[in-house]
Amino acid sequence: MTLFADIPQERLDAFLARSVPDLSRSAAQKLIEEGNVRRNGAVGKKNDKLSPGDRVEFTIPEPEPTEIQPVEMPLDIVYEDDDVLVINKPKGLVVHPAAGHQDDTLVSGLLYALGDHLSKVNGELRPGIVHRIDKDTSGLLAVAKNDLAHAVLASQLKDHTMARTYEAIVCGSFREDSGTVNAPIGRHPSDRKKMCVTERNSKEAITHWEVVARYRGYTHIRCHLETGRTHQIRVHMAHIGHPILGDMVYGHKKPELGQDTQCLHAGALCFRHPRDGRPVMVFAPLPQYFQDVIAKLEKMG
């Protein structure tokens, strides 16, 4: 992968950690020390000071194989055939192994339920996982049972023909009934765990939204993703001044209406079947936590 420096005198390791999603400062330093990073064609050093326009090329080695233990857990399967599985993921469940979550993820549950009947395109840590949703976002997630299905579904994600629709409760009131946020998203310059709207080392991000219902101080909206950047809806809604209720990372820093995690649900998923191209449309009803919030809002008038 190639990036171009944009801040004078920034250290090489800091630049990588800022620019690459999910790459910590220590992980960036390890990449550099192992000779996987080049600055203007020469092997880089972690304390190299960059100049705007410097070309930084790097490769991230494949992770060492990790034995993930299958774990029995309830899976809300809303669609299944020989090629594809669609799961209605509950809020709070991590999709694949990450720091602090090894055998308590959706992947462990899939391994228990399906064994070897999962695609291997994403390696040992993410078998079958075509796309992901955040730990505290509920809703639909497509899983590929074989490599053919994975390749076709990934292609649909890339060319935006897989339609994903989300329900959200956001803070504030909209004057319009619908709109579009077209604003590029990249890594936050000072907090590597966050994303933000930025022109620096960013990617195009487009979210279409429409009002479902208006309440006192809050709005129920439906969002259609044209692109699929990390935290896209959360970042875009905060960017236009309507952070998602309960999103204490991008929105208000105190719980509201009993919510301390984002009120965001992936409610619809539409794609063409990887085997024969027929349209597949899957829906997941609003979960109980979401219904409880609406009930509170309706009482508020």
Image (spheres, grey):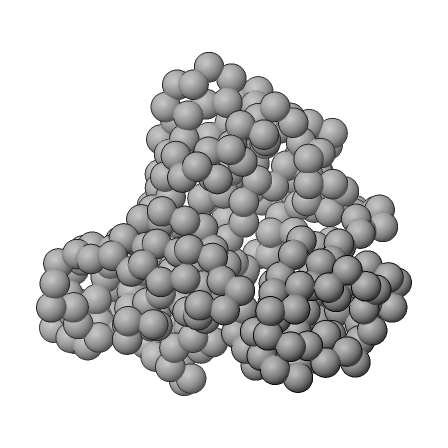
Q: For this view, does 218 lie left or right of residue 231?
A: left
Q: Can see residue 155?
A: yes
Q: Nearer the viewer, residue 35 or 287?
A: 35
Q: Residue at x 68, y 41 (%)?
A: 122
Q: Residue at x 34, y 79 (%)?
A: 256
Q: Nearer the viewer, residue 65 or 23?
A: 23
State the image coordinates of residue 23 (x, y, percent, origin top left). Answer: 68, 66
Q: Can see residue 18?
A: no
Residue 117 picture quarter: top right
Q: For this view, does 272 lie left or right of residue 108?
A: left
State the image coordinates of residue 74 (x, y, percent, origin top left). Answer: 58, 44
Residue 292 picture quarter: bottom left
Q: Is residue 28 above or below residue 59?
A: below
Residue 57 picture quarter: bottom right
State the image coordinates of residue 255 (x, y, percent, origin top left). Answer: 40, 80
Q: For this view, does 24 lie left or right of residue 33?
A: left
Q: Is residue 151 above or below residue 229?
A: above
